[in-house]
Amino acid sequence: MTTYPQRSRVPVPVPVPAPGAGAPRRDLRVLENATWRVGVLPGIGASVAFGQIEDAGTWVDLLRPTPLDRHVTAEECASFVMLPWSNRVGGGVLAFGGRGYRLRVNADDGTAIHGTVRDFPWEVAVTTPTALVLTFDSRDFSGVNYPWPFSATITYQLADRRLTVVTEFCNQHDEPVPLGLGHHPYFVRALTGPDDGALLQVPYEQHFPLERALPTGPAVPVAERVDFRALRPLGDEFVDECFTARTAGAPLRIAYPLSGRSVTVGSDDAFTHAVVYIPRDRSYFAVEPVTNANDAFTLHERGTPSSGVVVVPPGEGLRAAIWLDVGA
């Protein structure tokens, strides 16, 4: 846990910009080195517009490409940050400390999904050709879908073959608050052509039994249908699973055998869970490093193991990093 200095601040409600309103939402910051070319949209939740890697002298999309004129919400982007929780909150009720806090439902299944920071513009604090630091403070906005004030920082950094994303959360409330966070990158199913299909390795020993994407009990040994502990093709079945109990030292890895390229998805120990989403008949899939399980606040309140919820004291926070390492 990290301690942050408390700042004196007068809350000033600021209306949330309507989708597509104004140039700031289209502000595109591009980071580039010899291996990576990454576009970030500060005005759309600090989301990633595209993530490309060098291949035989050209840039190819590793992350799902979306035309810039369709970048209206974070979900349409190549990747976005989920904070202060990842995945779903069942019924939109955040359970904590014996109370239920009503959140705004923002998914068709009646849940509150993927946190709230993706809905707001972030401020650019530092920018260089290979790094971008963005900040967010919930006290600057009205309509933030979380009961307590907080601030956050996200840093995108390129170094050699690695893209690192560091997320920091600070509790600006005078009491402890519950926290979860994650990242939602969409990877392409085929890298350099239709025959260059992805193989996936997800070295986790357990997953949660889910009904409508919500856990029905504690994590259980991973089922054969979604057992990606050894590198294997994505397959044609629909997959939307939350994994936990990571195998120590084993990589979470995506490989494209035809081109011989691969990417290792690394993370700090805070990322104890991973969500894998493989839709049918789509050109992309998602591998999401997350700190918490689906509906984690409910699991935590019930005392269910491996909820992943972190309780953050006043003035303290969590700093956690993920990284994508590109192989030859």
Image: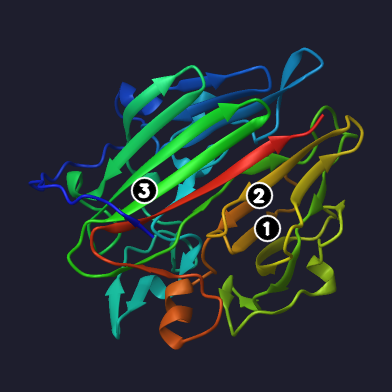
- Crowding at dot 3, Cα within 10 Å, few <14 / some 14-19 / many 20+, comes out as many
| Crowd around label 2: few <14 · some 14–19 · many ≥20 (10 Å) | many
Residue 258: assigned label = none
| Residue 5 position in % (x across, y down) | 21, 49
Write down the residue under mark 3.
117
Q: Amino acid type of disc 2? A: Ala
Specify whether residue 70 is in view. yes
**Above or below 150: residue 69:** above
Three-letter code, disc 3: Val
| Camera sees residue 27 | no
Q: Name the residue under label 2.
A: 286
Q: Name the residue under label 1.
A: 276
Horizontal side of 129 relative to 245 (left or right) equals left
| Residue closer to the observer: 52 or 22 | 52
Q: Distance between the residues labelled 3 and 2?
A: 19 Å
Q: How far apart are marks 2 and 1 (CA)?
A: 6 Å
Left/right of residue 23 with respect to residue 200 in the rendered view: left
